Amino acid sequence: MTIRLTRVADGEPFAPVGHHGVSPVRLQGGDGGMSVVLSEYEPGATAASAVQTAETIYVVLEGELTFAGGGVSVTAGPLDSVNVAVGDERSVHNAGAVVARMLVVRPAPSTEGPR
């Protein structure tokens, strides 16, 4: 049995393309398994519209975030989840006055390259 603990202070910060005012920290993943990221969205922060390369689940922990894509827009609050399928386009925006936090769960990118 393998149990891997990652304390949030030890997570790996990174800067995804098209994200403005967003501070993501990789808590788990990056090795070909699942990836779990904690993302903080400052008020006014955005993740630009992008086509999803993997099914992605977003779980809002604090605040509210608006997800848009395919002519649909939804606002998710604490403990709401949003699922975006492979090939679907999505953008994310924090229109609120407080920091919003969410977990992003998806397959980690393979480090082996295409198969």
Image: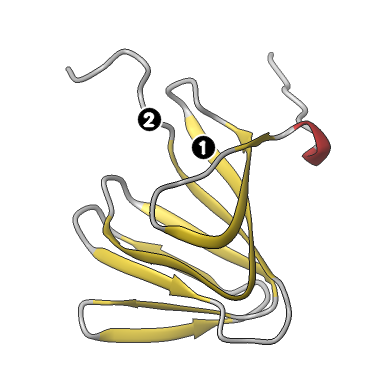
Quadrant including the C terminus: top left
Residue 95 left/right relative to 106: right
Callout 1 amino acid: Ser
Q: Is residue 31 left or right of residue 70?
A: right
Name the residue furthest front.
20
Distance between the alpha carbons at the discs numbered 2 and 1? 8 Å
Of the residues shown, which amino acid type is indicated by label 2?
A: Pro
Residue 82 sits in which quadrant? bottom left
Residue at the image point whose x is 72% and y is 23% from the top: 4
Residue 105 on image: x %, y % = 51, 48
Q: Which residue is mark 2?
A: 109
Task: Identify the secondary structure beneath mark 1.
Answer: strand
Is there CB contact under 8 Å for labels 2 and 1? yes
Q: Measured along the vertical axis of the image, is residue 82 above or below residue 22?
A: below
Q: Which residue is mark 1?
A: 35
Q: Residue at x 56, y 86 (%)?
A: 95
Foreground pick, 40 / 2: 40
Q: Tell me the quarter of the picture where residue 36 sits.
A: top right
Neighbourhood count class around disc 2 (C-alpha, 10 Å): few under 14, some 14–19, many 20 upward: some
Percent of width and height locating residue 98: 73, 80
- Dot placed on the residue nearer the N-terminal end, 2 or 1: 1
